[in-house]
Image: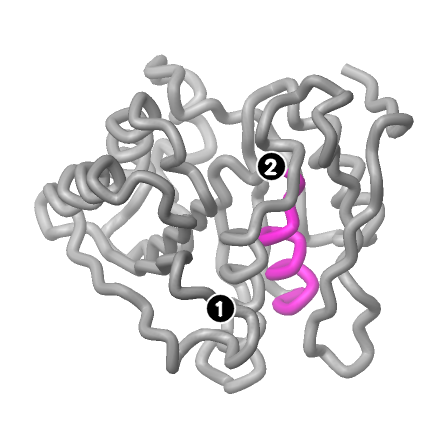
Amino acid sequence: MTFNSDNYIEYELEISRAEASPVRVLQDATGAARCGVGSTVWDAGLVMAKYLDHQAQSGELDLTGKTVLELGAGTGIVGISLARLQPKCTVILTDKAELVPLLKHNVGMNTCENAIAEALDWCDSGEQQLSGRWSEARPDVILVSDGIWASELHKPLADTLSRLAGEHTRVVIGYETRKFDEEAKFVALWSQAFRFRDIKPGEQHPVMQSEDIYLFEGTKKIGR
């Protein structure tokens, strides 16, 4: 599938590495490209990207030699930012097949040799997409930004996280609250297989945070 950038506009996000230029991604803010909500930069992604940036700058995040998997990567702004901040890790950005050309283009815009884009649709319950690469090895980190905006995504996402995460996988989820009662149902569903905690405002980037955006991190319960 080829990528046509005609309907896209560029978005830039500053990151803290002294020698780094801004992260640059194309997005379809108007919907003209008809690739759905994943082709837009959303605030929860920015908050998560800057949280990871803040962690890296404070010395609390070192992913040297680690593998990071982003689910529902969209424009890739979170995973690409992390790849730029942690050049000695491998970042695999995934989304539905129709968004992979945009992801690949945005990875190329940032010359991220440690980032790749692949198709993975967590609403496809088939085992084939979750086997192969992840049949034995497990990602060290899984990122999900604004992935629970529709209730029909909740169970497939929770099931996918349970299947992909290993005992030591750190899962970071961020979302902007829109329907609190529905989002609470996802959190309850996720908690069946994961222990998690909310990431406090004091741990996040001091400027790029919002009372409407929640960040959680969790690990899989032993034996699940």
Q: Which mark is residue 132?
A: none
Magenta region's main secondary structure? Answer: helix
Please give left or right for residue 40 compared with residue 14 in the image: left
**Quadrant of residue 157 within the rendered picture:** top left
Write down the residue under mark 1: 209
Using the image as rendered, state which of residue 153 and residue 105 is in the foreground: 153
Above or below, 84 against 105 in this view is below
Query: Which of pointers 2 and 1 lies earlier in the amino acid sequence?
Result: 2
Identified at 58% across, 58% down, the residue is 46
Please give left or right for residue 23 compared with residue 75 in the image: right
Q: Which residues are magenta?
A: 75-87
Q: Which mark is residue 74?
A: 2
The location of residue 131, given as percent across then percent down, is: 39, 25
Indicate yes or no whether the magenta region holds residue 94: no
Identified at 79% across, 41% down, the residue is 26
Q: Secondary structure at mark 2?
A: loop
Q: Amino acid at mark 2?
A: Gly
